[in-house]
Amino acid sequence: MLGQNDSLQLNSEDYLQTIDSINKTFQYQYGKIQLGNNIACIHVPEGYKFLNAGQSNYLLTELWENPPSEVLGMLFREDNHPLSLIPSYAVGITYSKDGYINDEDAKEIDYDELLREMKKDTKNANIERSENGYPTIELIGWASEPFYDEVSKKLHWAKELKFSNSENNTLNYNIRILGRKGYINLNAVGNMETLPQFQQDAEKILASIEFNNGYKYREFNPNIDKLASYGIGGLISGKVLAKAGFFELIEKFWKVILIVTLGIVALFAKKIFGSKI
């Protein structure tokens, strides 16, 4: 007769086997890959593997019950898996067709002042979040101060966030690649322990994606192309994303990446075994 500890061990073994079997269903790609309707291409950086749009959507919506998305794909470290129990991060790739972003304000931005405004906006938004049953958020500060490369038209920065329902702080690393009709959006979310690794790999991730001909920033035609209603400052501050529920996007859409921070093991075990742990 099995004792309680024996039963728990069997459940644990079944759980790990189920996780392993699901991880084995994912088929990764390497090398040069076209994104979207040939909008851009990615050269999968060394040490990473690419999950295509269909599998990424399945992972996010079916396995993790997140809202439907238009994700173009996801990057994972070669030594990690979407359902891995090892703390890491993944990079979600999307495309925002908001128009051509004029970058003339980039050199004039006071990032200290911008951070103060963002903290104030985040604090004010917590009133509505709390009323709607969402955990409140504290913007701790820059995990990595914004940097804009005027030549490559690539922007990146990182924020450290504190969700009221989590003991650990959350890292949200943002990369934006500007184009003629919009921008490629790369979001990496994990715990703060993953920051050094991502910073180490950031340059090769930045270099891995380029717009194809017809979508490049320099090809903008003011006579026929749409101009975005915001500049670099608005892109960083996230005000342009407020109506889309930017922090809900981090909290819900990307919760698959918060492997340790949001207790993914418990969430997935409940889904598999239909019980609380």
Image (cartoon, helix red, strand yellow):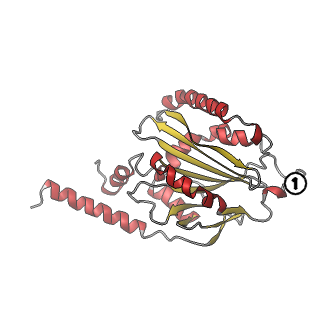
In the rendered image, the residue lying farthest to the left is 1
Q: Could you tell me residue 74's position as x and y percent? A: 56, 60
Residue drawn where x is 28% and y is 48% of the image: 277
Residue 267 visible within the image: yes
Q: Residues within 10 Å of mark 1 (few under 14, many from 20)?
A: few
Q: Quadrant of the N terminus?
A: bottom left
Q: Could you tell me residue 179's position as x and y percent? A: 75, 55
Residue drawn where x is 18% and y is 58% of the image: 7
Residue 65 visible within the image: no
Q: Quadrant of residue 240?
A: top right
Along the line of sight, which residue is nearer the eye, 8 or 87? 87
Question: What kind of residue is marked 1?
Answer: Asn
Q: Quadrant of residue 107?
A: top right
Along the line of sight, which residue is nearer the eye, 215 or 218? 218
Q: Quadrant of residue 39?
A: bottom right
Question: In the image, is 214 to the left or to the right of 189?
Answer: right
Along the line of sight, which residue is nearer the eye, 191 or 14? 191
Q: Could you tell me residue 184's position as x and y percent? A: 68, 55
Q: How many marks?
A: 1
Residue drawn where x is 84% and y is 52% of the image: 225
Q: Could you tell me residue 14's position as x and y percent? A: 28, 63
Question: In the image, is 134 to the left or to the right of 54?
Answer: left
Q: Compared with residue 119, is residue 223 higher up or lower down, i.e. above or below?
A: below
* Circle 1: element type: loop
Residue drawn where x is 59% and y is 66% of the image: 45
> Which residue corresponds to mark 1?
221
